[in-house]
Image (cartoon, rainbow, N blue to C red):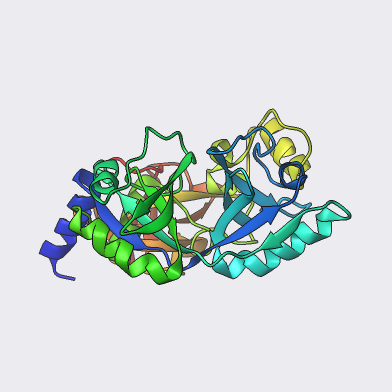
Amino acid sequence: MTEALTRSAHAAAREGGAVAPLPERGVLAATGPHRQKLLHGVLSNDIEGRTPGQGSLAALMDVKGHLIALVRALVTPEAVLLEMPAERLDVVERVLLHYRVAAPVRFARPPTAVLAVLGPKGRDVLAGAGCTVGELAPQGHETGRIAGHDVRVQRAGDLPAGGFVVHVAPEAAEAVVRTLRSAGAEPLPREILDALRIEDGRPWYGPDVTEDNLLHETGLVSEYHSPTKGCYVGQEVVARLEARGGHVNKRLRGLRLHATASAGTAVLAEGREVGRVTTAGASPGLGPIAMGYVHRSHCEPGTIVEVAGAPATVVALPMDR
C-alpha cells in the first residue's frame, strides 16, 4: 500500500467508519436446557448470569491454566453462540463434549461469516445500511437486516477502534459488505487492522495468543475473567497468580521500533533473546510498531531492547498515540 492509502484507511477507522472481513473466525452454537450452566462451569467469565442480548468475553483453559481458546459468548433465547478462531472449533468442541458428561447440551456449527465494522461512526454506518442498533454494552448484541439479509450485530470488545462484529450467512457477506461501504465504511486492509490492534493493545488468539500462554501473560485478565464466579477449568491457576500479584515470567508488551519487523522476530537484550514479536505493523503516527512477549527482566516500559538489528523501546499497551 502507498503511504496515502495507509493514512486514509487508518483515518477511516480512527475518525469515521471502516469494514473488514474476518474470514479466520467461526461460530460454535450450544443448545439444550443446561447450555449456560455447562459453559459457566468451564469458561472463565460469567455465562449463567447473562440474559438474551448480553454476552461475555471468556477464556477456555486447561487445568494448568494454558489457553485453549479465547471466545465471545453471545446469549440468545435459543442458544449460546461462541465466536472464536475457526481453527479452534474442533478442539473447543472436543473439550466441551468432555465436560458435558450426561448434560443435555448439543453443539453445532452454523455457517457464519464474521465482519468487523470499526470506528466512531460505526453505528452511523450500520444505520445507513438499514440496521439501527442501540447503545450496546460490550458484547451486547441485536439482530437486524442489511441488504435484505438477517444479521447479528455485537459491540465487540476485542476489536480496536471501538468496533462492532456482524454475523451473517456466508452467501450474504458480499452483499452486506457492499451495502456497508455504500453507507460510508471504507475497506480496511489487514495490515492496517493489525496496526490498529497493536496501537490499542488488542491481542488475538492465533497470532498473539496460543496454548503456550497463561491469561495473565496476555494482559486480558480483567476482560476475560470474573473474580466473583465459582470454579471453572483453570481457575486455581488464575487465583494463585492473582494472589501473587499477577507475576508471570513474560508479558505482552508494545514495541516502538526503529526498523520494520515481522511476527516471530526475536527481541534481544545484550545479545540474549528475551522475547518474540507476535504482530508487527506500521502506524501513520507512530511508525513501525509491534507487540510481543517480553521476559519480566526487560518488560518494564521504557526498557531499550533490540529488534531486527535496531534499537526498540518497550511500551505499555495500549500505546500512547
Among all residues in the image, which is located at the extreme top?
A: 228
In the image, 248 versus 98, the foreground residue is: 98
Q: Which residue of the protein is positioned furthest toward the right in this rendering?
A: 102
**Residue 187 at least partly seen:** no
Q: Residue at x 79, y 38 (%)?
A: 231
What is the quadrant of residue 22 in the picture? bottom left
Where does the N terminus fall, quadrant-wise? bottom left
Q: Is residue 141 visible?
A: yes
**Does residue 35 appear to the left or right of 215 in the view shown?**
right
* Residue 225 x %, y %: 62, 38
Write the residue at 25% across / 64% down: 178
Q: Residue drawn 57% across and 64% down?
A: 110
Residue found at x 42% / y 48%: 153
Whether residue 187 sits left or right of residue 63 in the image: it is left
User: Which residue is situated farthest in the left direction here?
Assistant: 4
Q: Is residue 16 left or right of residue 247?
A: left
Does 1 sit above or below residue 12?
below
Q: Quadrant of the C terminus?
A: top left
Tell which of 36 and 300 is nearer to you: 36
User: x, y percentage for residue 320?
Assistant: 29, 40
Task: Tell which of 315 and 309 is nearer to you.
Answer: 315
Q: Going by the picture, which residue comes out furthest to the front?
A: 148
**Image location (x, y in percent) of residue 14:** 23, 46
Residue 31 placement (x, y as % from top left): 70, 53
Is 256 located above or below residue 301 in the figure? below
